[in-house]
């Protein structure tokens, strides 16, 4: 069982709205793209895409931007996937661990998205495998859109004084559920993306909260 299964409904309740950085992803989409959402949770990115594109075009054509069946969600939490499947029964959802080889064929997707997923990879080896798998399953010229947390400084000393230099324990919710995250930086993300073969479009800190990386698989 994933640790997220133990508090899936509480976590899902905090993930009902889009983050501002999602707006950076929309211009990267083309009509009819196949999108893979790694760490999809309750499917909020799918909901954001549907709502945002329906505001741009009339209702009869809005679903053709990313048609039903062209969105693929992947997550380790059974409970969060159940929530997503209930909301989007015509899309595809898979349970698995994105620190391992992904169950998708090569040159398969027009966009791979990893929203607040990368910081769950707690050492260099799974980070590199994750990016290698992303570039493998992307079609040539297609895009990876990734956000990862800049860990809150209020947790700095309680982790550093316990010898946790890279992997911090940060509690979630009123019940203080324990979650572990890996620290990173713009320079480190850029280096890892280039090391695994990506062409880096941009890596930057967004609103002092999340690092946002956009990269492409070479044509």
Image (spheres, grey):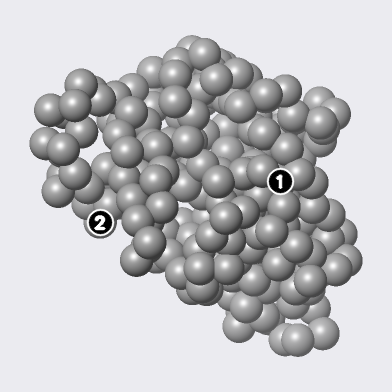
Residue 198 appears in which quarter of the rendering?
top right
Residue 110 coordinates in the image, percent (x, y): 72, 43
Q: Establish if 111 lies above or below 128.
A: below
Residue placed furthest toward the front = 175
* Image point (39%, 46%), residue name: 178
Residue 161 coordinates in the image, percent (x, y): 12, 28
* Image point (61%, 39%), residue name: 143
Q: Is residue 163 left or right of residue 70?
A: left
Residue placed most toward the observer, 18 or 85: 85
* Image point (66%, 49%), residue name: 77
Label 1 environment density (alpha carbons within 10 Å; few <14, some 14–19, many ≥20): many
Q: Establish if 132 lies above or below 109.
A: above
* Image point (67%, 80%), residue name: 54
The residue pinned by badge 1 equals 74
Residue 112 coordinates in the image, percent (x, y): 64, 42
Sequence order check, earlier mark of 2 and 1: 1
Q: Nearer the viewer, mark 2 or mark 1?
A: 1
Can residue 23 be seen here? The reply is no
Quick one: SS at disc 2?
loop
- Which image quarter is the N terminus in? top right
Quick one: SS at disc 1?
strand
Residue 162 coordinates in the image, percent (x, y): 19, 26
Q: Is there CB contact under 8 Å for labels 2 and 1?
A: no
- Which image quarter is the C terminus in? top right
Residue placed furthest toward the bottom = 59
Residue 81 appears in which quarter of the rendering?
bottom right
Label 2 environment density (alpha carbons within 10 Å; few <14, some 14–19, many ≥20): few
Residue placed most toward the observer, 160 or 40: 160
For the residues labelled 2 and 1, the Cα–Cα distance comes to 27 Å
The residue pinned by badge 2 equals 207
Residue placed most toward the observer, 114 or 96: 96
């Amino acid at each position: 069982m994933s640790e997220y299964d133990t508090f899936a409904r509480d976590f899902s309740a905090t993930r009902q709205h889009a983050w501002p950085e999602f707006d950076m992803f929309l211009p990267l989409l083309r009509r009819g793209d196949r999108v893979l959402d790694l760490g999809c949770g309750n499917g909020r990115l799918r909901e954001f895409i549907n709502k945002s594109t329906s505001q741009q075009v009339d209702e009869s054509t809005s679903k053709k931007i990313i048609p039903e069946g062209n969105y693929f969600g992947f997550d380790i939490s059974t409970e969060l996937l159940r929530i997503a499947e209930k909301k989007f029964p015509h899309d595809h959802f898979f349970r698995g661990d994105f620190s391992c080889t992904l169950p998708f064929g090569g040159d398969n997707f027009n966009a791979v998205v990893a929203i607040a997923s990368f910081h769950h990879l707690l050492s260099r080896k799974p980070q590199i495998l994750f990016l290698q798998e992303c570039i493998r399953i992307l079609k040539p010229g297609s895009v990876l859109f990734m956000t990862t947390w800049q860990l809150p400084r209020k947790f700095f000393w309680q982790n550093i004084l316990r010898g946790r230099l890279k992997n911090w324990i940060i509690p979630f919710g009123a019940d203080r559920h324990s979650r572990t995250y890996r620290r990173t930086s713009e320079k480190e993300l850029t280096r890892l993306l280039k090391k695994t073969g990506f062409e880096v479009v941009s890596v930057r800190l967004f609103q002092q909260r999340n690092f946002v990386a956009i990269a492409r698989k070479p044509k």
